[in-house]
Amino acid sequence: MVNVTSFKTARSEEIFTAAQKLMPGGVSSPVRAFKSVGGQPIVFDRVKGAYIWDVDGNQYIDYVGTWGPAICGHAHPEVIAALHEALEKGTSFGAPSFQENTLAEMVIEAVPSIEMVRFVNSGTEACMSVLRLMRAFTGRDKIIKFEGCYHGHADMFLVKAGSGVATLGLPDSPGVPKDTTSNTLTAPYNDLEAVKALFAENPDQISGVILEPVVGNAGFIPPDAGFLEGLRELTSENGALLVFDEVMTGFRIAYGGAQEKFGVTPDLTTLGKVIGGGLPVGAYGGRRDIMALVAPSGPMYQAGTLSGNPLAMTAGIKTLELLQKPGTYEYLDRITKRLIDGLLKAAQEEGHAVYGGQISGMFGMFFTGDPVHDYEDAKKSDLAKFSRFHRGMLERGVYLAPSQFEAGFTSLAHTDEDVDRTIQAAREVLSGL
Ligand SMILES: *Cc1c(COP(=O)(O)O)cnc(C)c1O
């Protein structure tokens, strides 16, 4: 672990400065640029278990886990070994492979709503495809999404979106035609009355409701009691579909995702992150009668050159196998609860108003004393304070997501000692904020 005096960033700065001339903002995805927390990003050299090493040789305890996929710890030896074996047979087939069957069976077995599945290459692709499917199945164009929820960067979802859009404070994105988003209706998260009103104002026009069943892209916001159940009822009553975007929560907050955890079964589900085990995979699936519409079984077109890639399938299969071992989710829950309880306690004892929580290996802490039930509440967080906290933690060898509007993640590789060191670092930083 780094101590403040040995923290060096010369090499990271050199690489990032060069990157800014080569790629917009110097990155391949916006939040990585550290814009909202200030300072320059660190440039990674390698990852292993719960740790990151940067190009200056600093070591960090990692609570981003490549945004969720590293749930078994980075570069798990069994995942790496399986990948080596798969690699010998080639990197891409563009044709059916047995690995797709294996991962499909595992996903169908695990996720209550999924009877059939289609693999794609990212969460964005999964969400844009599921939206097409919602419309194809219902013959209706409108959808309801929630403020602060992120469903990838497809046009129709860039309305009051979370993640990088929230981090950068972008209301919408230029380049998205009004016609495209005119069918996207939004409601505050956890607000059933608002959803009810939208259904009343748009009779027989709404194809469905899509949401993060636990929000991770506006910071960590769990659903209020009855919210998911209420959406299930409202969608069914109105002939609309309920879609859980479990790209983040799938295989993370329980093996079967939020739908297993909360006992509410949607019609369709999107997956990503964990199911790729660190390689690019997304998926959408659900009721067999709906999935039957997807080409070539049905008329709804959707395709992908690298979809079902044997390496990506292999990493996903091995990761899910590791997660099936007894006690994994209990471990994630215990270690993460210890972490967030310790952080909240340290913050309160140092005189800061904070609000936070966790479910399994997903957590978050806002710098506001008021409860956070939706994106408006999340925005009350003291962002300047969060930035100073983030930088202080970085200098002490703890890598947190570089935005207040992102959840944190633990892994099976995080130990009690890592958590203790993190809380100790936090106490030091918080005492000086
Ligand atoms: C990350 C995420 C996406 C987008 O996935 P990408 O693989 O980044 O395209 C969509 N929905 C949710 C809930 C996510 O967390």
Image (cartoon, helix red, strand yellow):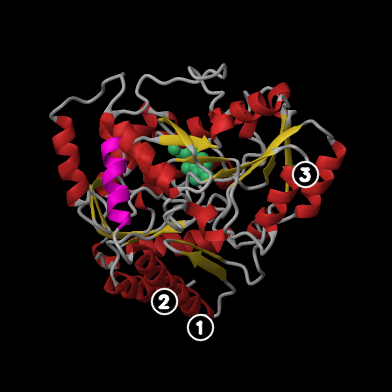
Q: Which residue is mark 3?
A: 237
> Which callout, 3 or 1, points at the residue further toward the start of the chain?
3
Tell me, yes or no, whether the highlighted magenta stretch contains residue 320.
Answer: yes
Where is residue 58 drawn, in percent x and y?
23, 57
> Which callout, 3 or 2, points at the residue further toward the start of the chain?
3
Report whether 359 appears left or right of 28.
right
* Disc 2 C-beta below 8 A from ligand 1: no
Q: Amino acid at mark 3?
A: Glu
Q: Secondary structure at mark 1?
A: helix
Where is residue 50 drawn, in percent x and y?
28, 59
Magenta stretch: give its range. 313-324
Find out whether the residues at labels 2 and 1 contact each other: C-beta distance under 8 Å: yes
Q: Which residue occupies the extreme front position in the image?
A: 289
Mark 3, Cα crowd under 10 Å, few <14 / some 14-19 / many 20+, is few
Q: Secondary structure at mark 3?
A: helix
Where is residue 118 drawn, in percent x and y?
45, 30
Relative to 18, say whether 222 is above or below.
below
Q: Which residue is mark 2?
A: 427
Report whether 154 appears left or right of 108.
right
Q: Quadrant of the N terminus?
A: bottom left
Q: Tell me the residue at 41%/75% (across/down).
A: 338
Relative to 368, say whether 94 is above or below.
above
Where is residue 416 drawn, in percent x and y?
30, 74
Find out whether the residues at labels 3 and 2 contact each other: C-beta distance under 8 Å: no
Q: Which residue is mark 1?
A: 349
All told, the count of numbered labels is 3
